[in-house]
Image (tube, grey):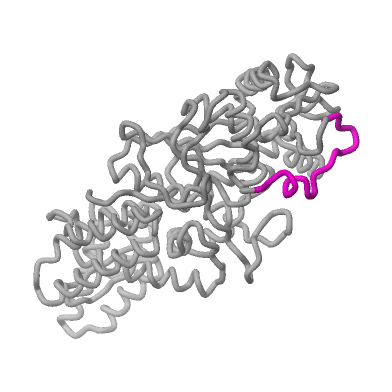
Amino acid sequence: MPHAMRIYNTLGRELQELAPSGGTIGMYVCGPTVQSAPHLGHGRAAVAFDVIRRYLVWRGFDVTYVMNITDVDDKIIAAGNRLGISPDEVAAEATDKFLSGYRALNVLEPDVMPRATDHIPEMIHLVERLIEAGHAYEADGDVYFSVASFGDYGKLSGRDSDDVLVGARVEPGEAKRDALDFALWKAAKPDEPQWESPWGPGRPGWHIECSAMSEKYLGFGFAIHGGGQDLIFPHHENEIAQSEAAAGSAPFARYWLHNGFVNLSGEKMSKSTGRLIDLLTAVEEFPPLAVRLFYLRTHYRSPVDFSEEAIDDAVATLERLWSFRRRVPGAADAQPDPTIVSAFSAAMDDDFNTAEALAVIFEAVREGNRRLDDGEDAGPYVAAYDELMGVFGLCEPEKGLDDISDEVSGLAARFGVPVGTDAEATVTALVGHRQDARAAGDWDTADGIRDAMAELGIVVEDTADGVRWYRR
């Protein structure tokens, strides 16, 4: 493809050309801290980086995608105390909910999904390296990173020491030397998860987890590190500091990508404020792929405002897209139109501009529909649709009838139609019987079949291309 890829790098705060080494891209995205169920903001992050990953693969890169699970953390422990269950139970239940939400949104599984509690030895080793290099110190069983020892601190967020000091303090019981220093290892407290370490029993700090796991699976100096904008400071700033201090070189990651928030009435959605909409509730109330489309209609770095009207519009838009594809059943028998593909890649090469890329897909649908209406060959546009909707993970899922096969058989018996070898064959026979009734002017039977199938979620449409049916 002729376009150079330009992506916005938070490290430098500018558009930069993506130039991976040897066509391989290591991609690490900070996954959830699993203290409670996911909200719509978590879904937005998962979809944003899922599409970036899918596009890079489609573009021809060899991508290794890593997304971690933080399953030990102050918030998880606090949730367990509040609920009267163990932190492990909190993490396990919340992890299941996150992964269920991601699957509903058609988010592909990561190549690697490491859990923090499975990587304690790697974290301890990284802390030891930092102590040996003079960038960390032990104090009463805790270990802290010395921010003053790392001259580049603040280069990701653009904050200087005075900015960082705002709100920084030494909490009661802490023995750190400077208010800016942050915990790499926390000494054990009663009834908390703990592991043995050279500094006594304890558990890792939050920031050390991602540094240790990303280095294990992607090495030092990998291509893309991603996450929500709320992670820029302090989490990602601290990751850079501890990783580059331990290695004695830079960069820890070359491109830093951050997605925008989902807002409610213009204010950020977050667990801390209580302003949130549960993701699992949303994908039960609305078609999950419509929620996915809702996210993709806005550039990943921009905020997006949630409303039921916006989701309803996404539902209608998705139906228009899928209706085009239903006009040509089966696999596309042509090569994708090159002009459409080129325009799509140009939009996505401009910092993954999904909004512009969707406009290209709509153009393919418009021209494809026109050609079908005029009896012309629409194959290249159908093929382009299939390929590009696949990149976005928005293709209409195949919906079988196995779960309603008994109901379909009962419907056939009701109208005197022989039951076929499977539910699909029976539905086809019912549609044929309806057509015979229409030809004979038996509108009661024809309308009765159509309405009864609709009650099962099976839509029958009479179109210029003939009769077609599909399961909604």
Q: Is residue 206 magenta?
A: no
Vertical arrangement, residue 309 with respect to residue 418, above or below: below
Provide residue 117's location: percent of width, then percent of height: 64, 27
Vertical arrangement, residue 401 with respect to residue 244, above or below: below
Provide residue 152's location: percent of width, then percent of height: 62, 36
145, 419: nearer the viewer: 145
Vertical arrangement, residue 211 with respect to residue 338, above or below: above
Write down the region rendered in magenta: 159-176
Is 463 left, or right, of 334 in this rendering? Answer: right
Provide residue 62's location: percent of width, then percent of height: 33, 35
Q: Main secondary structure of the magenta part?
A: loop
115, 440: nearer the viewer: 115
**Which residue sits at x=54%, y=26%?**
249
The residue at the far right in this view is 172
**Which residue sits at x=64%, y=42%?**
154
Is 159 left, or right, of 98 in this rendering? Answer: right
The residue at the far top in this view is 198
